[in-house]
Image (spheres, rainbow, N blue to C red):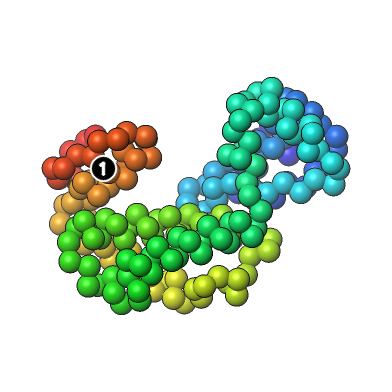
């Protein structure tokens, strides 16, 4: 791993060496490269106690108050986040068949945003060695049914030329930290 190459497909780094400061950050960064929706973070398995060295390195090279952003929560906390995201989906659409009953683009927007949050939480969980569908309030089959409905909405908006509608512009603006949301629809040929 210390060859200078990024390893964005590698999910777990096994470390049995005392590293500190730049060397520690550099080594951790090799597996932290994202890979689209498939990999949003990486696991580090240290055979030595590097907690203090890690905290010191992040304090030196980053914002010392951002440790909760840098160090991911444990599996139980991640599972709890997934459960909360799934409860939100159930409030919007109690069953996956209910997605077809959403009446407006605004209703679809709420569902899409909630389902994306659910997918992000699932990606985080699946990167963990402890992952098991049995720990979740939904099974893989039901998740895939919801996902199919999510993709149907996407394809519908794409066919209608609304792929850059308020829904998607709103989500993009939210990701960029902008507060206002455009109310008009922009054709898919327009550039942001």
Residue at image coords 22%, 72% = 101
SS for dot 1: helix
Quarter of the figure that contains the C terminus: top left
**Residue 132 visible from this viewpoint:** yes
Place of residue 128 in the rendered image (x, y in percent of width and height, measured from the top left): 65, 58
Place of residue 162 in the rendered image (x, y in percent of width and height, measured from the top left): 18, 51
Is 92 placed above or below 42 here?
below
78 with respect to 2 (left or right): left
Place of residue 77 in the rendered image (x, y in percent of width and height, measured from the top left): 61, 56
Residue at image coords 19%, 58% = 105
Quarter of the figure that contains the N terminus: top right
Where residue 46 sits, quadrant-wise, is top right
Q: Please give the residue where the numbered disc 1 appears in the rendered image.
A: 169
- Toward the viewer: 188 or 58? 58
Residue at image coords 54%, 43% = 34
180 with respect to 18 (left or right): left
Q: Residues within 10 Å of mark 1 (few under 14, many from 20)?
A: some
Place of residue 88 in the rendered image (x, y in percent of width and height, measured from the top left): 40, 63
């Amino acid at each position: 791993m210390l060859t200078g190459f990024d390893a964005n497909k590698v999910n777990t780094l096994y470390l049995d060496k005392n590293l500190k400061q730049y060397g520690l950050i550099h080594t951790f960064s090799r597996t932290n490269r994202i890979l689209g929706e498939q990999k949003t973070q990486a696991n580090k398995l240290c055979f030595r106690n590097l907690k203090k060295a890690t905290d010191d390195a992040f304090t030196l090279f980053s914002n010392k108050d951002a440790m909760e952003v840098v160090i991911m929560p444990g599996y139980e906390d991640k599972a709890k986040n997934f459960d909360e995201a799934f409860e939100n989906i159930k409030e919007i659409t109690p069953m996956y068949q209910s997605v077809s009953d959403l009446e407006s683009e605004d209703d679809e927007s709420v569902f899409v945003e909630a389902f994306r949050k659910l997918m992000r939480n699932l990606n985080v969980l699946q990167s963990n060695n402890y992952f098991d569908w049995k720990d979740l309030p939904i099974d893989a089959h039901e998740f895939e049914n919801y996902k199919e409905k999510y993709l149907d909405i996407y394809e519908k908006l794409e066919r209608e030329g609304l792929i850059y509608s308020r829904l998607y512009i709103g989500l993009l603006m939210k990701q960029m930290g902008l507060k206002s949301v455009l109310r008009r629809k922009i054709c898919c040929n327009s550039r942001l």
